[in-house]
């Protein structure tokens, strides 16, 4: 998963070269635990690295855009909250965003699909792929 944040100065100009001044924390909403970036586990306390920096995407092609790529495939289903920060001299920016994970994927829970419906859709896709494979390679008539 990729979290992207655009940062602008007080004159609305994109800030480039500011990766070292960025920060990101991830909170699991269900229990308010924070991600420890050191071992990629959620903890109530005792973090080694509760925040990390973002990387600049491209000062030329996407000035002011920063990102953090995170492997969320093993995280529990539910809501997560990303807290973002930038502080350099007189320019201080804070932001936040929420995302929902289901089976290790970011989904939009407002679309109304339940886990059972998503599982059924995945099973149907897999069945269609297997059926097509059998027809193509095993010469089974349709």
Image (spheres, rainbow, N blue to C red):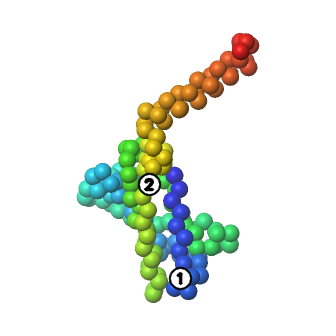
Q: CA distance from mark 2 to mark 1?
A: 26 Å
Query: Viewed as shown, does residue 79 lie left or right of 19?
Result: left
Image location of residue 34, percent across then percent down: 33, 58
Q: Neighbour class for label 2 at 10 Å: few (<14), some, many (≥20)?
A: some
Foreground residue among 48 and 105 = 105
| Residue 133 pos. (x, y %) | 68, 22
* Residue at the outermost left position: 45
Which x, y percent locates residue 45? 25, 58
For label 1, the residue is 9
Q: Is residue 49 left or right of residue 140?
A: left
Q: Does the rendering let one see residue 1?
A: yes
Instruction: Please say if 12 is above or below 48.
Output: below
Residue drawn 73% across the image and 20% down it: 136
Pointer 2 with pointer 1, Cβ within 8 A:
no
Q: Is residue 40 above or below residue 11?
A: above
Q: Nearer the viewer, residue 99 or 54?
A: 99
Q: Residue at x 52, y 71 (%)?
A: 19
Q: Residues within 10 Å of mark 1 (few under 14, many from 20)?
A: some
Image disc number at residue 99: 2
Q: Residue 15 in the image: x percent, y percent?
A: 57, 78
Residue 135: name its quadrant.
top right
| Sequence-first disc among 2 and 1 | 1
Q: Nearer the viewer, residue 19 or 125?
A: 125
- The mark closer to the camera, 2 or 1, is 2
């Amino acid at each position: 998963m990729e979290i992207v944040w655009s940062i602008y100065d007080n004159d609305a100009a994109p800030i480039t070269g500011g990766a070292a001044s960025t920060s990101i924390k991830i909170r699991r909403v269900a229990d308010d635990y924070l991600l420890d970036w050191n071992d990629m586990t959620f903890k109530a306390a005792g973090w080694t690295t509760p925040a990390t920096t973002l990387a600049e995407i491209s000062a030329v092609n996407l000035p002011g855009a920063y990102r953090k790529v995170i492997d969320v495939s093993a995280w529990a289903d539910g809501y997560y909250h990303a807290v973002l920060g930038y502080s350099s001299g007189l320019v201080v920016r804070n932001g936040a965003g929420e995302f929902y994970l289901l089976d290790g994927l970011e989904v939009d829970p407002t679309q109304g699909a339940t886990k059972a419906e998503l599982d059924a859709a995945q099973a149907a896709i897999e069945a269609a792929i297997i059926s097509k494979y059998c027809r193509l390679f095993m010469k089974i008539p349709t």
